[in-house]
Image (cartoon, grey):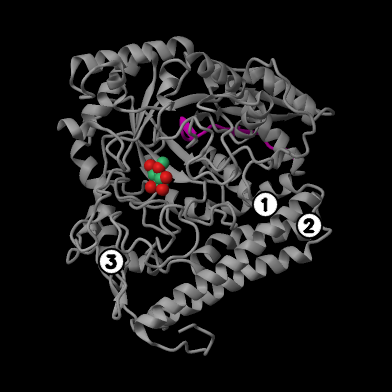
Amino acid sequence: MNLWLTRLKDPVPAGLKSPAELAGFELSHALPDTQVILREQPALNEGYRIEPLPGGFRITGGHTGLLYGAWRLIMDRLCGEASAAVIDSAPKYAMRMIDCWDNPDGTVERGYAGRSLFFRSGKLSWDPGRIRELGRLLASVGLNVLCVNNVNVHYPAQLLLEDDLPSLAALAEAFRPFGIRLMLSVDFSQPMRSGIPTADPLDPAVREWWKSAAARVWSVVPDLAGFLVKADSEGAPGPFAYGRTHADGANMLAEALRPFGGTVVWRCFVYNCRQDWRDYKTDRARAAYDHFMPSDGDFHDNVILQIKNGPQDFQVREPVHPLFGGLMKTNQMLEVQIAQEYTGQQKHVCYLMPMFKQILDFKTYMPGHEDATVADIISTRTLKNANGGIAAVANTGNDENWTGHDLAAANLFGFGRLAFDTTLDSESIAREWAELTFAGSTKTAIDAIVDILMRSWSAYEKYTSPLGIGWMVNPNHHYGPNVEGYEFDRWGTYHRANWRGIGVDRTTKGTGYTMQYREPNASMYEHVETCPEELLLFFHFIPYDYRLKTGKTLIQHIYDTHFEGAQDAADFLDTWKKLDGQISDKEAYARVLKRLEIQADSAIEWRDRINTYFYRHCGTEDEHGRKIYE
Ligand code: GCV
């Protein structure tokens, strides 16, 4: 089963050596009756041009650009689009990455689609056919870097830099024809495994250790993309232990990787994960900006800071991270999560491209670049960054259908398509995915799938936590409602609901987080009247009887959206039931039906828990007299 490439019946054969060779194979296999001339023009790199010729096409492209051009042509043709015009295309970002949080024991942190595709029993181990199919899927949407192991580097993942090097080299070789380079997550304290008493980035022995580690790994994987580092975060080791900055840590690695052209991707997910809930001044949302802004300009040019889309942690709604537009002299990349950790865990349908588009289109008002959006800031061209990019935490695993929920594959497809071309709109991506995946289904079915996808993020948001406050999930595994699950815990994730109202005061009277944004965004968030209402509770503590722009009170809004969201989930199920017999792949139909049933039930649970919680706090009756449990 191959997701959106279901119509390509033949697997990729073993032995193809380069993207150009693969492009030839894919074209002759997918479009046997179309004559396509491939012309390599190395300067185009990952870019390509497709020109219609009498009776066929010519694709001119760089080494990998040829493959991307081939896929564009194949997918357009499979969707029945006639390519009469010349198409010129090149990706906006140099690094379009999938972060796999796979552990050597074969588990996947926040994995919802089975076990690891890369590891088993403590070692790298894979099914070559499956890796080729994964390579094909990722290449078909233009993704070019895959980080193979979890950013939480648990032993024995350290062996990837030691005994497991030959396997790493073999895996890199398997992905090479697809234009995909591997990246490794590394343990900042790893030199200590070799008897060095410290991991201090300014210690000469530590620096030497990393240089020789880099030489060792690049000697077997010469095109390794680099190292990904989670440091001083949620218990991971890092430079803070030695009184050093993140720039000290990242630059030390950058120097070790420079001779090999390697990049250090350094994560900004740094906060105090031992907060006391009674502490109203510490604000997890502020943490990354407070840690990293003072070092703006100190990072080497082969370091990229990887910044989560929001200041908390991949919630269904968060404001854009203030480091975007804050940092002026540092390479940046955006990290999103298509693994649906907080958005239904691939049991619920939640198509995330509409959210990603809002993030990419957000204007930060960075001085001198007032019109630049997040999409521009992370691109390698607009702000003349040496490096930049976009990464998603992967949603794939060894489940036969790759992503657990068949509709979750739209997020993998969509992420790749958007990463290559941020100007695409979410609905056309959804339609393209649905047409490719469910080819042979009725038009009614394709329209219904697109409609479900396009409504799904909003539905999920409606029946879960209100107006940007987030969390309210069960601790640890993060599935299902638990309104106070994190309220008295140490993770800095409080909603502060009481009998008067709900929300976190992040204004200058509260934690001061609003001032991390550039103007006019800072003032917009600072004032209740101008704060976008979908983020109201993220920025402000609001009484239940506060009137929103709709004229509804906050409490009525909470009741209404929860009834609506649960109804949306019920509608998705009803719609799907009506499609019985109209979806070409009967097994996929049955699998999706099961997941939509789970979602509809879970949405009711969410609705009732949240509504009851707030009803008990404020005692206000629902204006429409619907059942709210006491
Ligand atoms: C890989 C959240 C997740 C963790 C994850 C962490 C991170 O806290 O729940 O599983 O760890 O983010 O992004 O590092």
Q: Are marks 3 and 1 in contact (CB under 8 Å)?
A: no
Query: Can residue 84 be found in the magenta stretch?
Result: yes
| Mark 1 within 8 Å of ligand 1, using the beta carbon | no
| Total numbered badges shown on the rendered structure | 3
Instruction: Judge left or right: residue 390 versus residue 127.
Output: left
Figure quadrant, ligand 1 = top left
Q: Which residue is mark 3?
A: 504
Residue 30's spot in the image, x, y percent? 78, 31
Which residue is at the front of the view, 476 or 597?
476
Q: Is residue 537 above or below residue 147?
A: below
Q: Is residue 51 above or below residue 583?
A: above
Q: Give amino acid for label 1.
A: Arg
Q: Which residue is mark 1?
A: 431
Q: Give amino acid for label 3.
A: Val
Q: Is residue 264 above or below residue 283?
A: above
Mark 1 lies on a secondary structure that is helix
Q: CA distance from mark 3 to mark 2?
A: 46 Å
Instruction: Judge left or right: residue 588 versus residue 341.
Output: right
Name the quadrant containing residue 554.
Answer: bottom left
Q: Tell me the magenta residue range.
A: 82-98
Local packing at callout 1 (Cα closer than 10 Å; few below 14, some 14-19, many 20+) is many
Mark 3 lies on a secondary structure that is loop
Q: Is residue 604 visible?
A: yes
- Which callout, 3 or 2, points at the residue further toward the start of the chain? 2
Q: Which residue is mark 2?
A: 443
